[in-house]
Image (spheres, rainbow, N blue to C red):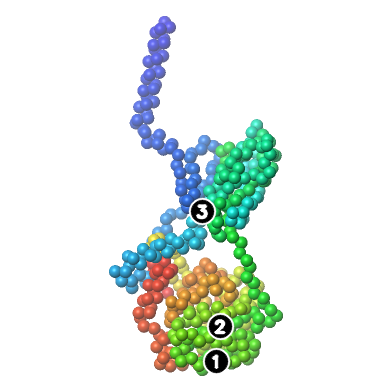
Amino acid sequence: MWGLGRSFFIIVLCIDLAFLFSLFYIDIDAWRKTSSKILRFSGLIFDNTPQTSDFLRPSIGPFYDIPSSCTCRNNQSASQFVSKDELEDLQRRRAEEYRQHQIRTGRENDVLVLAPPNTPLQYPIRGFRVTPMTKTLIPGLSVQTQNRELYKVSLRVQKGLLSVMDVKEDTIVFGQNEGNLTISSSSLEHLNELLSRVTYTSTIFHIKTEDLAYFSFENHEVIFPIEIRRQSVPYLYDPGKDINSQVTVLVKAFLRYKELNALIQSIRVNYPKIKIIVADDSLDPEMVVGENIEHYIMPPAQGWFAGRNLALSQVTTKYFLWVDDDFVFLNETRIERFVEIMEAVPELDVVGGQVGNNKFAFKLNYKEGNSEGGCISRVRGFYAPLPGFKGCFFVDGVVNYFMGRTDAVRKVGFDPFLKKVGHSEFFIDGLGELLVVTCQGLKIGHQKKTYTPDYGKYRHPPKADSENKLTHHYFKNHLKCINY
């Protein structure tokens, strides 16, 4: 009986093993699905291995679709005037410049992290900033959980080193001054005391980048960002005691000296001492004289934006007021009102007024698009009122009469490629960089238009200039189409 039973057991066991092997070969793909998955993003590696846990692990982006092609209604293709022989090489250079732009602007650090629910881990969710290659305590690390025989946590980073300060001999710490750190203790209080002494030191020197720290306990893991920043030095403007030490009036002049002198006389009615800077690229320059006037002679016909850059480069006041050479100050023109608004709302960079009854202001609808480039269109309107200031509204661009914050506008600058046609282009370059509002009632006058033959020739450029400008934006702003 024993021999017969033993033989029967062996036969059953062999049948079971054969059945299991048959399952493996029948559905080998199902077995492969259990292999570890690695998600790579911006040079960071995240282990996405399935966990047998009741708790979710953090999710790391991207969570968005790849940017798709965009279109503009009634659009002008920004590349339509590039010759076919040059287009391929131009696109190659543009793609490389755009790649470098994304690195410089920190796009490689744009990682969306979703926090898991019900985690016992405490950690800094934002605001932890370190100086490059400088040891810094990580604030707020702790574990909040029930009693256990042993508590064990780990941290890991990619661009730095982790350590625990003042480690004693009986403390269990592995990975001191490495990218992976493990801390163990039989006491939760002792563990949290050690976590309060954990430091981070970046191993790379960069003035603006980011690392991700992975903090885990048992089956729980969270991710938090570490900002690596080189601290900048403040650049402050002494506002002085009156409007003359707060604002400089800027003018770009070309040929129209009669109008320019009328503008200066109107300014001096209420502002006899305010500084006026004139950038002049006239063909045959004339002298512009007067108290506290700086007249800069440029090479002939260098253009509007080149003149703006020159004038702005000489400003030593906190704000500047931009006016055209054929504007005229009215009795109700008050520079102080601009200053009051900008001083009350320090985040503002540009405040626009109105020229006569012209209250022109606009929004810019921009879609980044894909490798073909982005799409941008200009539409009239505003976003929302500026709280506390009736008649003021947030916009993307304003009429050619505005007050600017000197340091902010200098960072954007005026593209000297644009000689004869250009205004909205400044605000395109400043999109996302300059906070702009338009305000009703901040009024200046416009002198009666008088055109000389020479001025008219430069004021209305040939069609080729507009075509070259479009090609310029195709490369410079990585645009597929533009709609004004």
Disc 3/disc 2 C-alpha distance (Å): 42 Å
Residue at image coords 44%, 80%: 419
Q: Which residue is mark 3?
A: 111
Query: Rounded to the nearest whole Å, what is the CA distance between mark 1 and mark 2?
Result: 14 Å
Q: Nearer the viewer, residue 394 or 60?
A: 60
Instruction: Specify the farthest residue to the left.
Output: 85
Q: Position of residue 154 (x, y in %)?
A: 59, 41
Residue position for label 2: 250
Q: Amino acid at mark 3?
A: Val
Pinpoint residue 427: horizontal percent, then vertical percent. Answer: 50, 73
Depth-wise, is mark 3 or mark 2 nearer the camera?
2
Q: Is residue 405 left or right of residue 5?
A: right
Q: Residues within 10 Å of mark 3 (few under 14, many from 20)?
A: some
Is there any visible trace of residue 338 in the rendered image?
A: no
In this rendered view, identify the residue nearer to me: 230 or 250: 230
Residue drawn at point x = 40 percent, y = 85 percent: 460
**Residue 216 is drawn in which quadrant?**
top right
The answer to which image quadrant residue 388 occupies is bottom right
Front disc: 1 or 3: 1
For numbered disc 3, what is the local secondary structure?
Answer: loop
Q: Image point 45% across, 72% down: which residue?
A: 378
Q: Secondary structure at mark 2?
A: strand
Question: Which mark is drawn over residue 288?
Answer: 1
